[in-house]
Image: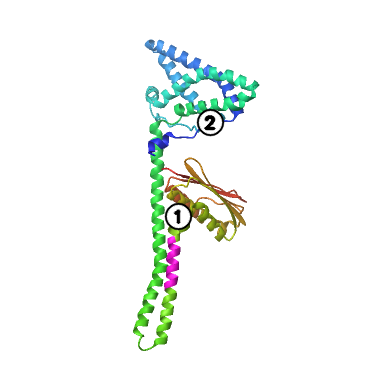
Amino acid sequence: MTIDQQVQHVDIPRPRPLRSIVYMFVSFLFRLLQFVLIIVGLAVGIGTAVVWIGFPILMATTNFIRWSADRERGWARKMLETPLEPVERLPVEGLSLVKRWLTRLTDPTTWRDLAYLMVAFPLACVEFPIAIASIVLLPMAIWVTPWIGWLHGNLAFSLLGPNRTQKLEQKAERLQASRARGVDAAEAERRRIERDLHDGAQQRLVAVAMSLGRAKSKFDQDPDAVRELIDEAHLDAKLAVSELRDLARGIYPAVLGDRGLDAALSAQAAKSPIHVDVEVDVEPRPPAAVETTAYFIVGETLTNIAKHSGATEAGVKVWRTDSMVIVEITDNGHGGAEVRPGGGLAGLADRAATIDGVITVVSPPGGPTVIRADLPCQW
């Protein structure tokens, strides 16, 4: 999936029946007022522009269009649950009154605002009687009205939401930031592996080589000492193999590749010093990068819970939507967890960012703590 395809895909929720009815009923009055003021303002402003009186009227009408569209964004976000955020407009600070108006006229957002307001009034004329009928007819209120609200929410998002260029810019900025954090996380992981090899397996192998060297020098003179040195070398070799196995498991556990997240997370939970309930439903199986990220997020979180939270039990729930894998870890500890630079939770966020994932932490004082990771299956 390309970036362009990703930014065009936004899930618009279906609003609740009562909110849809209220939205369609109340909006009719505002849409009527907006439509009349805009049409009259444009007609009078353009008609009197030849005698200069029209320009102040057109400026006021332009400001009214933008103000009305901003109110519509908030109204649709509140009642239809459409994910509409304030849009970025062309900057006008420091410009004269006329240049401000001309800048607003060249801003594509202004014309998209106008398009929505012109379309919204005819739609309101249709939605208003449907809202009245929905008050009387329960089946229409339950099944028809929410779908009309959903269609209106999609229209509002397409015209009042960020335009395609802004979406691409926001996506590119987010990807750039997440990739930078991913590089930092990969570099930290490389240093950890290098440190573990240097302090663990490498030291063991050096000890094996030294023991074998000493045994070789004493092979003819002191057979008993040679036997002890070989036993020591054998023990160090087994320890080195064990440490290398643990290191390999830390990079990519075999059970994860062979049996998937359910078995791998259950194995993690079994090793935890506190009771952990695990619930996994990720069919169809997500990409390996998503599985690995989810596995390490759960593992590091359970370790932090056991060390710092004071919790007696925890829960791990993993499920999949069409495009995401959601990981949610909860505990009954004392709470107060937060993302701090250089802290464990910041490390989890950096790991999730390598695949454009997001970590959310809710941990009020006194608990409970909920750590959620939203991991996209396509990036």
Quadrant location, the C terminus: top left
Q: 67 or 153: nearer the eye? A: 153
Q: Tell which circle, 1 or 2, labels the residue nearer the N-terminal end.
A: 2
Where residue 301 sits: x, y (%)? Answer: 52, 54
Q: Which residue is mark 2?
A: 77
Instruction: Using the rendered image of the protein, determine whether residue 154 is visible from the camera's viewpoint.
Output: yes
Where residue 111 sits: x, y (%)? Answer: 41, 23
Circle number at residue 257 = 1
Q: 95 or 310: nearer the eye? A: 310
The span picked out in magenta is 237-248
Amino acid marked by disc 1: Gly
- Distance in Å between CA atoms under marks 1 and 2: 42 Å
Number of numbered callouts drawn: 2
Q: Local crowd at mark 1 within 10 Å, few (<14), some, or many (≥20)?
A: few
What secondary structure is marked by label 2? Answer: helix
Amino acid marked by disc 2: Arg
Question: Quick check: 306 left or right of 249?
Answer: right
